[in-house]
Amino acid sequence: MALQEIVSLAIILVVVFGAAPFLGAYLDRVYKGERHPLSFLAPVEKAVYRLCSIDPDTGMGWRKYLRSVLGLSAASLALLFAILAGQGFLPLNPQKVPSMSWHLAFNTAVSFATNTNWQAYSGEASASYFSQMLGLTAQNFLSAAAGMAVALALVRGLSSRKGAPSEPIPSLGNFWVDMTRSVLYVLLPLSIIVAILLVSQGVVQNLSPYVGAISFEGKRDLIPMGPAASQVAIKQLGTNGGGFFGPNSAYPLENPTPLSNIVELVSMLLIPAAFPFLFGRMTGRKRQGHVLFAVMLALFALGVGASMASERAWGSLEGKELRFGTGLSAFWSAATTATSNGSVNAMHDSLSPLSGMVAMVNMMLGEVAFGGLGSGLYGILALVIITVFIAGLMVGRGPEYLGKKVEAKDITLAMAAIIAPNFAILVLSALATMAKAGLAGVSSPGPHGLTQILYAFSSAAGNNGSAFAGLGANTPFFNLTIGLGMLIGRFGVIIPMMAIAGNLAGKRTVPESAGTFRTDTRMFGILLFAVIIIIAGLTHFLALILGPVLEHFLLLKGVLL
C-alpha cells in the first residue's frame, strides 16, 4: 500500500473515532434541549416552531410519531416526483434538461425520500439545477433527519421510566422538534463546513451553464458545472450518497484531491459512529453504548480488512480511482456500504468478487456497522432484542434489556423489522432473474450477472443506493421493482421499530437481580456479533454461493464471464 493511502487511512480513523464520543455528547445536549455551542441559534429554532405552528412542549405517542414520519415521507415523495416530472418547465435549467419519465421520476422520488439515493440516471445529464437544489438536496436533509428522529424515539422508549400502572405512557418526544434540531444544530452547520472545505479543493459550486472545452483528442466537449459542493456535503454527512455527477465521487469535479477524499470519508462515518455514544448518554448507561460501538467497529473492521485483502490479492486496476489508490477504493466500498451511504469513488462492478461480496454483505447485514443516520442504531437494536431473547433462553429466565421485559410482541416485531428488507432482497432478485425485463439489464452472464441483480436489490432494500455499475437499471421494470424494494426497506423496518418503542415505553422497569443477563459486557457483545453474522449467513448463504463465491473460484481457474 502506498504511503499516501496509509496516511489517508490513519487520518480518517483518528479523526472519526477520536471525535465520535465528543459528537455523541454534543448530540445528547442538543436533543435534551440543554445549552450547547450552537445555542445562539435558539431564536431560529423558535421561529421555525411559530411558522409551522409546532408546540415543542407537546409529546407524542408512538402512533402519532409514526404518522408524522410517514406523512413527511409521503409529502416529500409527492413533491419531489412533481419537481422531477416537470423540471423541463421549471427555472434554473440552463442546459434545458428535459423532464424525467414517470417511472424514473417515481424511482428517484422514492429513492431520495427514503434516504436511499439510488440513481438510475446521470445527475449532470438528467437533473436540472432546480431539481438538484430544491428537490434532491432538500431531501438529503429531511430524510436523514427523519431517520435520526426515529432512532431518538426508540431510545426514549427503551430508557423511559414508567411508575405505577395507572400512570400515562411516557412520551417518545416530538418528531418535528427532533427534525428541526437535527437539521439546525447538526446537519446544516456540518454541511456548511464540509462544503467550504470541498470548494477549497476544487469541487464546483455555481449556477453557470456548462463550459465548452477541447479534449486531448481534439474533440469538442462540455465540462459540467453546478451547485455540487453543497449537495456533496450533505450527501456524505446524511449517509445519502446521491452524486451530483454520474460517476459520483470518482469524478474529479466532485472529489478532486486526496484531501477532499479524506473529508468525504470522514463525513460519511462521523455521525453514524457517534450514535452509539449518544445512545449510552440518553439511556444513562454509557457502557451499553460502548458495547454497541464495539460490535459495530468489529463488523466494520472485518469488512474493511476482507475487502482490502481481496483487492490486494485478486484485484485489478480496472474501475479503480488511481488518484487515491486501490486500497482507498476498497476502503470506500466497505465504508459506504457499512454506513448506508451509497456513494462511490470506484466502480463496484470492477471490484474483485470477494470485495464485491463484502460490500453486498454489509448491506445484507442491515448496514449496522455503523449504519445510516439513525437507521444504523435502530437496526442494530432490533438485533439486540433477538440477542437478549436468545440470552434469556441460555440463562433460563425471561429476556430483559435496559430493565425492560422483552416479550413475545417485541420479539415478533423485531423479527418483522429484520425479515422485511431480506424478504425484499431475495424475492425481488428472484423475480428479476425470471423476468425477461430483468435479465435484459444484466451486462454479464453467469454468476457475475446474478451478483449485479442481488447487489441492486440489496442496495435498494438496505436504503444504501450504491450501484454495481454494470446493471442497466433505467427501465420501467427496474425502476418500479427497485422503488418497491426501497419502500419496504425503509418503512418495513421503521413501522415495527416504532411499535416496539411504544410497547417498551409502556412497561415498568424491572430491577436487576443475580439472574439478570447483563448486556453491557464483552460476552454480550460477542453474542450480538455472532447473531448478526448468523442471521445474515443463514438468510443469504445460498445466493452468495451462486454469485460472488462461484465467480471467485472461476477467477482462480482463469475463467472470466
Image: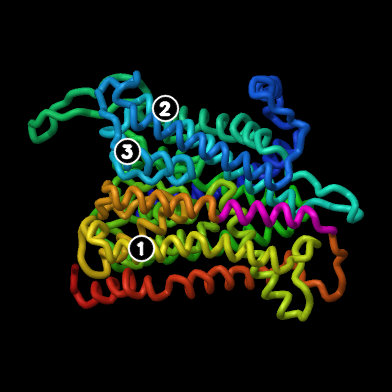
Residue at image position (77%, 81%) is 396
Q: Tag 2's secondary structure?
A: helix
Please name the residue shown 64% across and 66% down the image.
412
Q: Nearer the viewer, residue 183 or 431?
A: 431
- Residue 343 place in picture, x, y as percent: 40, 46
Residue occupying the point 71% across, 51% down? 155
- The residue under label 2 is which amino acid type? Met
What's drawn in magenta, residue-wise?
493-508
- Disc 3 from disc 2: Cα separation: 20 Å
Residue 55 percent across, percent down from the top left: 74, 28
Against 550, is 65 above or below?
above
Where is 501 relative to 41, above or below?
Answer: below
Please tell me how crowded label 2 is: few (under 14), some (14-19), or many (20+) other residues with Cα within 10 Å: many
Q: How many angstroms separate mark 2 from mark 1 (CA)?
A: 33 Å
Quadrant of the rendered structure where residue 70 is? top right
Quadrant that contains the C terminus? bottom left
